[in-house]
Image (cartoon, rainbow, N blue to C red):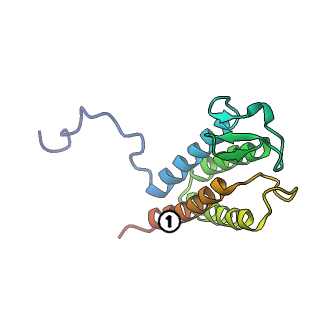
């Protein structure tokens, strides 16, 4: 079958008509929400009995690698909500991805500079978090720049 009916039986794509930057921001927002929730789930987060509100003393580790606290999980949840809210417009989506990526690069630098065993490590962060923050920062900025370009 050729023409407008060629794909009439295909499952509809819910993202039809949505600019790629909005889809990217929405996807990243959903991922942050998921990670924020998983940070509270025993089994996925080890040491949930030792989950502190904030600081380096929290003994909980998401996926056994990323040190988390209640505050850390709440930051992920808020980032997810912000991503979904900003994904409603092209400029908001681009701002979320590029601005959020910049924030994660600052968090990466914070993680490199702070002594992980002191009270200054309030989120808390460890080496695994540092690598993840670097990847998130670069990845989010790349998504915002590459998917936010005008089509020509």
Front residue of this view, candidates 33 and 152: 33
Quadrant in which residue 47 is drawn: top right
Front residue of this view, candidates 52 and 146: 52
Q: Which residue does the numbered mark 1 point to in the structure image? A: 142
Front residue of this view, candidates 148 and 38: 38
Residue at 73 percent across and 54 percent down: it is 125
Residue 90: x %, y % from top left? 53, 59
Residue at 72 percent across and 43 percent down: it is 73
How many numbered discs, if any? 1
Front residue of this view, candidates 85 and 36: 36
Residue at 48 percent across and 64 percent down: it is 148
Please, is residue 77 above or below residue 123 in the view?
A: above
Image side of residue 57 versus residue 67, left or right: right
Residue pushed farthest bottom?
152
Residue 3: x %, y % from top left? 16, 45
Quarter of the picture holding the N terminus: top left
Please, is residue 15 above or below residue 122 in the view?
A: above
Quadrant in which residue 39 is drawn: top right
Image side of residue 20 versus residue 108, left or right: left
Please, is residue 48 above or below residue 20 in the view?
A: above
Residue pushed farthest left?
1
Q: What secondary structure is found at the residue carrying circle 1?
A: helix
Quarter of the picture holding the C terminus: bottom left
């Amino acid at each position: 079958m050729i023409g407008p009916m060629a794909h009439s039986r295909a499952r509809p794509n819910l993202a039809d008509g949505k600019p790629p930057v909005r889809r990217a921001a929405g996807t990243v927002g959903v991922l942050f929400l998921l990670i924020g929730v998983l940070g509270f789930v025993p089994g996925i987060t080890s040491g949930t009995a030792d989950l502190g509100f904030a600081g380096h003393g929290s003994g909980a580790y998401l996926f056994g690698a990323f040190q988390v606290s209640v505050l850390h999980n709440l930051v992920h949840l808020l980032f997810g909500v912000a991503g979904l809210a900003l994904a409603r417009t092209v400029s908001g989506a681009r701002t979320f991805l590029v601005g959020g990526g910049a924030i994660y690069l600052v968090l990466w630098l914070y993680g490199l500079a702070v002594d992980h065993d002191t009270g200054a490590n309030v989120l808390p962060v460890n080496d695994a978090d540092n690598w993840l923050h670097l990847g998130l920062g670069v990845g989010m900025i790349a998504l915002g720049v590459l998917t936010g370009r005008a089509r020509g």
